[in-house]
Image (tube, rainbow, N blue to C red):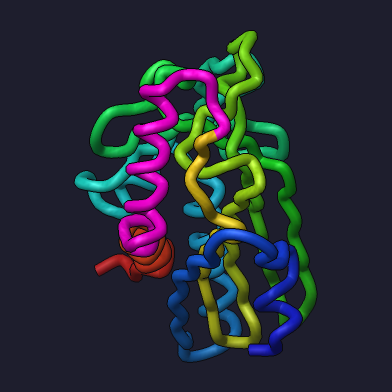
Amino acid sequence: MKENHRSQGIPPNETGVAINADNSLELKDVNEARSFYKTVRQRLLDVNNWQKLAGKALASFQLTNEKGELLNRLAQQGDYFKIDIPGPGPKAGEGFDWVQIEELKEQNEAEIESISIMVRPAKKPTNLSNDVSHFFSKESTSTFKAIREGNKISASIHDRNAKPNIDVDTITDKARNAAVGSGAIAGFAKIQWQSLVDGLLKREE
């Protein structure tokens, strides 16, 4: 796959750690690939069902609006993810980690189709405090991508500038974010994202 399609929409890693997960498969012909890409695209936008794809032992994701109200639809730019990871959550997020969709882009051409969703750690939408409610700092991003090129489909997730969020007011959140953020960098983010990537590309039996 051409490098520009792989890297398009992914911020450079200037500080902290880069974490990547990816998978791909080749279909028997372009028509089958086009059909299955529609399934992968739907799965990627259906954030509320990510846990089913990745495995129930991992984090759960719920799509919300700017008021923190749950949304039962596909993701759109500006939406939030309300994330419940195993273990204690941040006080600032009332027990949940939060990110916001900063960018959602699609490309549709004869030989190449792609979708990219970039999210950034955010405060809980209804909080008066500006404290970011996530174990990673506000400089961090996660980019979720699906690409069809010919009869090949790839899915990937890219964390950039990942580092623990210790710029918070409460000592408990500072300690929690340092521990969880370090654990994510050490390995559990890679496990979470690889499980989701594999789920996105899973063929129905």
Residue occupying image coordinates x 59% and y 12%? 127
**Residue 62 appears anywhere in the view:** no
Q: Quadrant of the image for the N terminus?
A: bottom right
Give the residue at x 69% y 64%: 14
Along the line of sight, which residue is nearer the eye, 187 or 67? Answer: 187
- On screen, residue 45 versus residue 96, left or right, reads right
Magenta stretch, overall SS: helix
Q: Is residue 61 left or right of residue 102?
A: left
Q: Residue at x 54, y 16 (%)?
A: 69
Residue 160, percent across and down? Answer: 60, 60
Q: Which residues are magenta?
A: 167-190
Q: Would you say 20 lies left or right of 77 here?
A: left
- Relative to residue 151, is residue 63 depicted above or below? above
Q: Quadrant of the C terminus?
A: bottom left
Give 147 or 93, whichever is nearer the viewer: 93
In the image, residue 170 above or below residue 152: above
Left or right of 177, for residue 136: right
Q: How many marks?
A: 0
Q: How far from the left and from the top, in percent, is residue 153?
A: 53, 78
Task: Residue 155: say if magenta.
Answer: no
Q: Which residue is drawn at the image coordinates 36% and 68% (left, top)? A: 198
Residue 138 location, x and y as percent? Answer: 63, 40
Nearest to the observer: residue 9 or residue 168: 168
Picture quadrant where residue 23 is located:
bottom left
Residue furthest front in the image: 171
Q: Is residue 121 visible?
A: yes
